[in-house]
Image (spheres, rainbow, N blue to C red):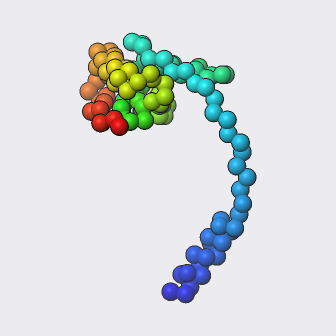
Amino acid sequence: MMTIVTGIMINLGPILARRVEVAHFEPEPTMIRVDVAGISKRAADTEIHIGWKSVSRVTLTEFGIGFVTQEGGWFIPMSAFGSENDLKAEYDRIVSFMVSLQAGPETEHSVPRTLH
């Protein structure tokens, strides 16, 4: 037992003792546009557009609307909407785009959760 504890402490010692400088992070404004063609994300120096076939899941939570895409996850926060009703209306619009334009049963959308 002592050997195991000693081995763990030897391995964790440098990790626990190390002080890491965290670089200052400044969030960058990002604009996400949703339309019948798909989703576009634009930041200061980048613009990405993906079609609905690249979106495998859309989810509504109390924090906003999330997308799972082939390129990774995208998120539109609650703060991007004027109200909870605006958020729900946008989610319904997005789901209708996906259902009407995306070929294939592999796409999922979750049932909206109760928002607080």
Residue extending furthest toward the top: 36
Kindly identify the residue that appears in the image at 49 percent across and 28 percent down.
79
Residue extending furthest toward the bottom: 2
List x then y, in percent, for residue 88. Answer: 34, 24
**Displayed quadrant of residue 34:** top left
Looking at the rendering, in which quadrant would you find the C terminus?
top left
Along the viewing direction, whichever of 112 and 109 lies nearer the viewer = 112
On the rendered structure, is 1 left or right of 91? right
Along the viewing direction, whichever of 115 and 12 lies nearer the viewer = 115
List x then y, in percent, for residue 18. Answer: 71, 63
The answer to whether 76 is drawn above or below residue 114 in the figure is above
Along the viewing direction, whichever of 100 and 104 lies nearer the viewer = 100
**Displayed quadrant of residue 84:** top left
Residue 75: tell me if it is visible.
yes
Residue 70: tell me if it is visible.
no
Kindly identify the residue that appears in the image at 55 percent across and 81 percent down.
5
List x then y, in percent, for residue 54. Answer: 42, 25
Along the viewing direction, whichever of 37 and 86 lies nearer the viewer = 86
Kindly identify the residue that appears in the image at 66 percent across and 72 percent down.
13
Kindly identify the residue that appears in the image at 29 percent across and 32 percent down.
112
**Displayed quadrant of residue 26:** top right
Give the total number of marks visible in the rendering. 0
